[in-house]
Structures are given as C-alpha cells and as structure tokens.
Amino acid sequence: MARLYPFRALRYDPTLVNLTDVVTQPYDKITPAMQDAYYSASPYNLIRVILGKHLPGDTDAENVYTRAASTLDEWRNDGILKEETEPALYIYSQTYVVPGTSEVRERRGFIALGQLHDYGDKVVYRHEQTFPKHKSDRLALFKATRAYCEQIYMLYSDPESKVDHLLFDTEGQQPPASMRAPDVEITDEYDVIHRLWKLADPDIIQKVLDAMADKWLLIADGHHRYETSTAYMHERATQLGLDPNAPPAEIAVAPGTSLPAPAFPEQAMMMTFVNMDAPGITILPTHRVAFGLSSFQGREFAAKAEQYFTVTELQTSGHSELLQHLNDTPGVAFVAATRDGNFLLTPKSEAISPLLAGLSERQQRLDVTQLHKVILEKLLGLDEETVRAGGNIRYLREASEALEQVGSGNADVAFLIKPVTLEQMKDISLNLEVMPQKSTDFYPKLLSGLAMYALD
C-alpha cells in the first residue's frame, strides 16, 4: 500500500549557520510576531522561503513566491544549503512537556519521501476539511520553488512496533543510528528538544521500507500541503505524459545494491511517519473565537442556547478554572466565554438531534461537530461555507488568548472545547468521513528546515 523512499536531503551546512536560528515552526502556526522574529534571527532563516513577507509593490513578476525561489537558489549556490551525497532516511525524536501539565513525553518517527495518492485509493486518509485559499497559496509556492521545505505529519498503525525496533532498538550486534549522538539537536521556542539522526545503511533502509509496505497512512498535520501536492503531481504527470501511479524507479547506492526512488520527482513529497500505537502522541484542542457578529450580547446568546443546551453560568473567569470546569464535565460540553459572563453548555440530546440529521452516529458524538452544526450554524447563523472561507471564526490553541480577544473587544465570544481523541480521529478517517477544519492540534509541531526535498 504505502510506498516510501529514501532521498538526498537538502540540509543547512552547520558550519555556516546556527541551526537554531534558521529553523521554524510550520508555516500555518507562524504569527506575524513570530515571522518578524524569524526574519531577525538570521538572514538564512527559512521563513524567507516558506512564509515570506508580501510587499506593497509586488507584481506577477516580482512577489513573495518569486523571492522565495530566488532565495532558495541563492542559498544553494552559496553552499548554505547542501544536498546529501547519498539517499537516506532521517530518524526524528521530539521530547516535550505536555502543555498544562508536568508530564514529559517523547514522540519518535522518521522522515522519508511518501508517494502521493488520491484519497480514493484508500492508502492515505484525511480527517478534516481544508481551506481553499491556503491550498492556492501553497501551490504557488511549490511551483515557484520546486522544493518541499516542510514535512507532512503522517500516522501509521504498527502495534508490534516493528519499524520503531529497526530505528530505535539494538538489533543483533549492530546498534541503530539513534543509539549514537544525534546529528542535530535543537531546542525550539516551546522548549521542545528536537533530535535528528541520518540513516544511510541501505540494508536497514530497505527493511524499514518493507515494514511500511502494508501500511495505510493517516494525515495528522498537513492536509493543505498534501492535497496541493497531489494536485501538483497530477498536473506534472499530465505534462510529462506519465502515469501518476507509475512503479518506482531504482537508484544505485553501491555495487549490486539499489534502493527505490519515485518514478518522477513530483510523485512523492517529504513526510514524517509516526506510529500511532506508540506512546508520545498528544492532541490539543483548538478553541474557536467568533468575531464581527451583529449585535451580539452574551446573555442573549445564553438564553437562546437554552433551547438546545443546559446552560450553567460559571462564576470563574480565568482560563485554567474554565478549562477545569470543562474537563470535569463528562461527555460533550463547551464553555462560551463572553464579556457578559461565562457559560457551560451541555447538549440536550433530543433537542439537537434534528440538527445533526444526516450525519453518522460517530460524527454526531463529536464535540467539534456539535459546536459547528448547533452553535455556529444554528445559533450564530454562520453557515459552513462562511466558516470554511475563514469568515467570522479564528482558531486558537491557547484558551488564555481566546479569552483575551473577547476581553479586548477583538472577538464577541470564545468557545473552549475538549480535544478530539486519537481513536475518534481514526474512526472518522477510516470510514471516509471528515471533521470540521482545525479539529485537531497535534503537539509538538514538526520543525521546518531540518531536511528538505528539492525536486530539481
């Protein structure tokens, strides 16, 4: 099912740059303040490629995408970025503290190329909706740069941890690459420790590829980039007169030894693969704030909501206390934070059932589905197209930031929500259903700039 490939990564030369100063969070997690900070950190920070600044005089011939492409070319010509001489996989470990707790976890995976598939092939599964405008932005960037500077975060199921044993456990007399000191070790702005090991042993690489060959893949992060890349693959296959599902090519790595490679460069993209059956995965909630609502009043909203929810006014206002109330409430529940007061909402099953008609039972049980269908659509009048187009809704990881936006008048109401579980996400995905956009927030994010895949 899944076809994976080693690749000659494009990587920063650590003798010419401080790696901590040039890597970034994924493009869609970068705020304007973070963008400015990355620009200031180093003239070689990857921000100039993945999320450059738009300028007032931009034209079709000179714009954020053409600047990204010329910047990448310049760094390659100057040796700031160098392509590896041999195909490899890259073992990737992230050690972090679960936000809001003192629990330390380690998430393990590896970076490789993954062949692109239409969802209908039932090899790669999605779990949430996407925003059209984000896909057009990424497509313009891919076409200009002809490089993947960021990874898709892919999950696979391996209850026996066969792949992890190859990468992280001693096998016979030959310890795996991850037993030695890492090639890269970086602590990011969230105090997450990222470690990277290059794995170039063709025998171990082939064993990993073979172990992954029967897996299906589930997109955790990167739906926009995956869908954009798949569209780009089809476009290029048509231009080149090739079959998008053409069998792999081979690349010689030693006399008598070869490894598989994509049939054409656009057939695959860079991905980090993580075993969903291993420890270390954390999903955080993504809270919603609604803004620009006509004549919104918190108490009027609470009164209107009583038709569908049991509404309890909470006497606490701090984000920690509100989250505690939310998490202590069994089943589906939300906190609506307004300038008039904070309210705990628990659904009245019989009342909301007609509004969820047509959805599967697994969809109806999701907190995020009830939030969108009952609260956003029915109570606030924000239809699905408005929300998908990015109108009236912002998505925030931090409950404190959501409350601050309400308090400052930049939002009318914040909805604090519980996280989706891994089992819920898997159940939805494998049944070919999707949740509303921004339903999950996998933590921590994969750093951009540790390895890159240049198509040319």
Image (cartoon, rainbow, N blue to C red):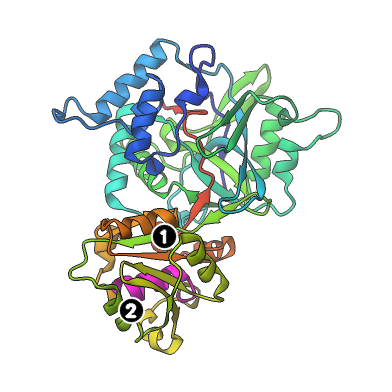
Name which residue type carries label 2: Ala
Tag of residue 302: 2
Which residue is rendered at x = 40% and y = 43% of the image? Answer: 29
Figure quadrant of residue 86: top right
Q: Are marks 1 and 2 in contact (CB under 8 Å)?
A: no
Tag of residue 339: none
Q: Is residue 150 above or below residue 411?
A: above
| Magenta residues, dominant SS class | helix
* Residue identified by numbered label 1: 287
Which residue is rendered at x = 29% and y = 29% of the image? Answer: 144
Between 78 and 163, the one lying in front of the other is 78
Callout count: 2
Q: Residues within 10 Å of mark 2 (few under 14, many from 20)?
A: many
Residue 370 magenta-drawn? yes
Which residue is rendered at x = 47% and y = 48% of the image? Answer: 221
Residue interval drawn in magenta: 364-377
Q: Earlier in the sequence, mark 1 or mark 2?
A: 1
| Residue 275, position as x, y percentages in the image | 64, 49
Figure quadrant of residue 67: top left
Give the structural element (helix, strand or loop) at label 1. Answer: strand
